[in-house]
């Protein structure tokens, strides 16, 4: 039997080893971003500041008022270039110790909303309820801005927009009015808060529909009081004027 030459065996072994290495390298996936880009694949798109949801439209939008143990919190946002440029609380708890808590917490929450570009912000220490209400109303404002049709702006900047006036306190309870404005006119008015309980239920059920109708017909807060509902009418007109002021008159 003929023996293989030692040098020939070594050459064959070396060739087999090199072939194996080449094969392994050719099968290695391009897992790093640089390799993917070099191979013609686009890098992953950056997530938007609103968490990948639909971009928010430019303009000014007011979130729904959030009820807390110490009072309502309502946030208004100014958006430019798809980014929150300003956040402010148009309603916040007030009276007694609430004044100090609000003056300390609200500026921090406003700043946090602009920095975070969303409602995922930390609560301010010592203002747990106010912080929770702020975040709830902030999220509402963001939802309204995202729901606006593309190119029309968000919320209050859109052609048809909904604005909620500040709650007016009366002898029998708060009154708060929300209006829908389109083409510079009030197309809908409704009381989101009104006195209730006991005789107030009857007064409210009789007066509020009349006041809503009067607001739409007049297009202003210059409406007549409903007979037998003097306090409710006064509170309604006050909150209606607040809503009109927010809507730009």
Image (cartoon, rainbow, N blue to C red):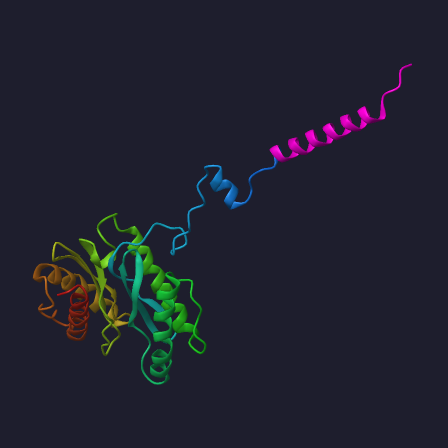
The residue stretch that appears in magenta = 1-26
Q: Is residue 235 above or below residue 136?
A: below
Circle count: 0
Can see residue 234? yes
Query: What residue is rendered at 44% in x and 78% in y?
Result: 126
Say left or right for 146 vs 183.
right
**Horizontal and vertical percent position of residue 64:** 30, 63
Say left or right for 212 vs 1.
left
Q: Quadrant of the C terminus?
A: bottom left
Query: Quick check: is 3 in the magenta stretch?
Result: yes
Q: Nearer the viewer, residue 25 or 148?
A: 25
Identity of the residue furthest to the right in this view: 1
**Horizontal and vertical percent position of residue 116:** 39, 63
Q: Quadrant of the N terminus?
A: top right
Query: What residue is rendered at 37% in x and 74% in y?
Result: 108
Query: Quick check: is 207 in the magenta stretch?
Result: no
Query: What residue is rendered at 26% in x and 73% in y?
Result: 174
Image-quadrant location for residue 245: bottom left
**Horizontal and vertical percent position of residue 239:** 19, 70
Q: Nearer the viewer, residue 138 or 30?
A: 30
**Horizontal and vertical percent position of residue 14:** 75, 30
Dominant SS of magenta comes to: helix
Can see residue 68? no
């Amino acid at each position: 039997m003929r023996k293989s030459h030692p040098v020939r065996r070594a050459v064959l072994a070396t060739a087999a080893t090199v072939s194996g290495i080449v094969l392994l390298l050719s099968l290695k996936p391009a897992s790093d971003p640089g390799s993917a880009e070099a191979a013609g694949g686009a890098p992953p798109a950056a997530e938007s500041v609103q968490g990948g949801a639909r971009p928010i439209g430019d303009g000014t939008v007011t979130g729904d008022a959030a009820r807390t143990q110490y009072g309502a919190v309502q946030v208004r946002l100014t958006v430019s270039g798809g980014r929150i440029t300003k956040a402010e609380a148009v309603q916040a708890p007030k009276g007694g110790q609430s004044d100090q808590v609000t003056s300390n917490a609200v500026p921090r929450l406003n700043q946090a909303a602009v920095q975070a570009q969303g409602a995922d912000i930390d609560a301010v220490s010592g203002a747990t309820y106010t912080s929770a209400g702020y975040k709830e109303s902030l999220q509402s404002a963001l939802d309204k801005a995202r729901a606006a049709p593309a190119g029309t702006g968000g919320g209050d900047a859109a052609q048809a927009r909904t604005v909620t006036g500040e709650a007016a306190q009366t002898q029998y309870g708060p009154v708060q009015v929300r209006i829908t404005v389109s083409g510079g006119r009030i197309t809908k008015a409704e009381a989101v808060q009104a006195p209730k309980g006991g005789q107030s239920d009857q007064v409210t059920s009789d007066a509020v529909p009349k006041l809503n109708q009067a607001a739409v017909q007049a297009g202003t807060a210059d409406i007549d009081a409903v007979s037998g509902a003097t306090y409710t009418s006064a509170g309604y007109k006050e909150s209606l004027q607040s809503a009109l002021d927010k809507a730009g008159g």
